Amino acid sequence: MKKFFKTVAKVIGAILGSVLSFLALCCVVTLIWGGVQASSGSVTDALPKTPADFTPEIRLIVFTDTHNENENVADAIDTAYTLFENDSVYPGVDAFFGLGDFSSIGTEPDYKAYVDTLHAHVREDTVCINVAGNHEFKADNYKQLFEQYFSHGLNTVTQINGFTCIAFSGERSLTEWTFTPKSLKWLSDEIHKAEDTAEKKPVFVFQHPHPFGTVYGSSIWCTPQLNPVFAGHSKVVNFSGHSHFPFNDPRSINQTSYTSVGVGAMARFELDENYIVGQHPEGYEEAAQFCVVEADSNGRVRVRGYDLLSDTFFCDYFIENVNDPDTFAYTYKNMKAHDTAPVFNKNAQAYAVLTENGDCRISFTEAEVPEGYIVHEYAVSIEDENQKEVYRDNFIAAYYIIDNDNMQGFTVAGDVIQPGKTYNLTVKAESAYHRYSAPVTLAFTVPEK
């Protein structure tokens, strides 16, 4: 029996050692890749603005990770038609692209509910293409279900107004996270074919997971299998999901030798804090973002984010020329160079209210950042009237909730601070590219019960 337990212990130790080694390797690779990105490209005087003479020749709507939230899908489709049907420059929507994870575990009822929603809202003259995500791959019969419910294959190439749109589901390999070499070769071949006939036009590629080390969330919710397929193909503008990381984080666009865009999520956000992924802060379920893509024949591409909950556009990126990577402005290095440290307004204030269960909800005036950038995290501490620290925390800023409120809130347990007492709140803000504000100290009084 002792021999048996020793053997089991050795096996467990070997497995743990392998897992830790793999995680360590991932960390090393991530750091190396991050260093490469941080030093690549040049710093421009300003980020591009969409010129007044830009006239689209194609308009695509892209959404991802709907996870059975089909009311959001319906809303996205209807909203897109409403936004653009009377556009004076280029009216209408040419196509919708769904980037997978429209289901929970890939069962037939999920397919039926999703496809019924598409049929009820997508007009007959509008192209609608979908790919399978890892949640669809959970079902062993994913190929049969996909072919049964969609009018196109798992991997498809569609010409829209002379632009090549490649939708890549891949083919499940050993796990739901990996693609077969055969399917990756198909993608590579189609990119080469598209480039040969594209002239100056971009080549659009759509799939579920991010390429590793590109957009926000791609350090873990990704596949490195795609990186060598896309590398060096400057015409490629790639759209992906999977991470659920918010589209309004400026790191959701990234240019290396090609362009990557992470289009957020239509159901539940996820974020990271201090590089630890899997964070679900307050309001994370309030997710309904989609992407609007426009382009012309000269290689110019406009990418915008739209938030269904607030009915607003929240980001606007303009790629001046996909044919010339030397002009790429959305490199990590350049985006960080245009970020600045958050600043607290001199009139910033803090307030406290008691909740129904006796806790204390503290709100303070948000720090200000340049347009297109965000405060990603706040560090807070609270001292009593004797300068004794009674509370300290770091938390993710609620930038993913788009509203007109300029206040940020957090909740402290009722036994931490006392009603009727005055405290000093010290706040420090951190931007997406790790710029730090000067701390600000704000006094607040807890109301009596």
Image (spheres, rainbow, N blue to C red):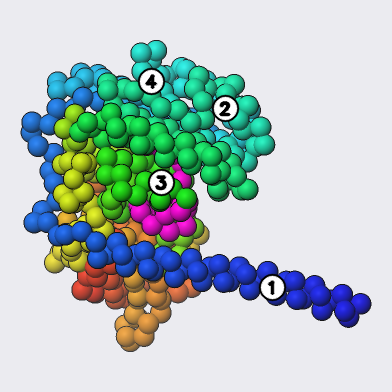
- Three-letter amino acid code at the position of disc 2: Phe
- Residue 267 location, x and y as percent? 46, 41
Label 3: which residue? 229
- Three-letter amino acid code at the position of disc 1: Ala
Residue 14 is labelled as 1
- Residue 196 location, x and y as percent? 29, 32
Quarter holding the C terminus? bottom left
Q: How many marks?
A: 4
Label 4: which residue? 127
| Residue closer to the observer: 374 or 55 | 55
Mark 1 crowdedness (10 Å alpha carbons): few <14, some 14-19, many ≥20? few
Label 2: which residue? 146
Query: Residue shown at 24%/61% (left/top)?
Result: 40
How far, Cα to Cα, is label 3 from label 4? Answer: 26 Å
How far, Cα to Cα, is label 2 from label 4? Answer: 17 Å
Identify the secondary structure beneath mark 1. helix
Q: Kindly report which numbered mark, 2 or 3, lies closer to the viewer in this rendering.
A: 3
How far, Cα to Cα, is label 2 from label 1? Answer: 39 Å
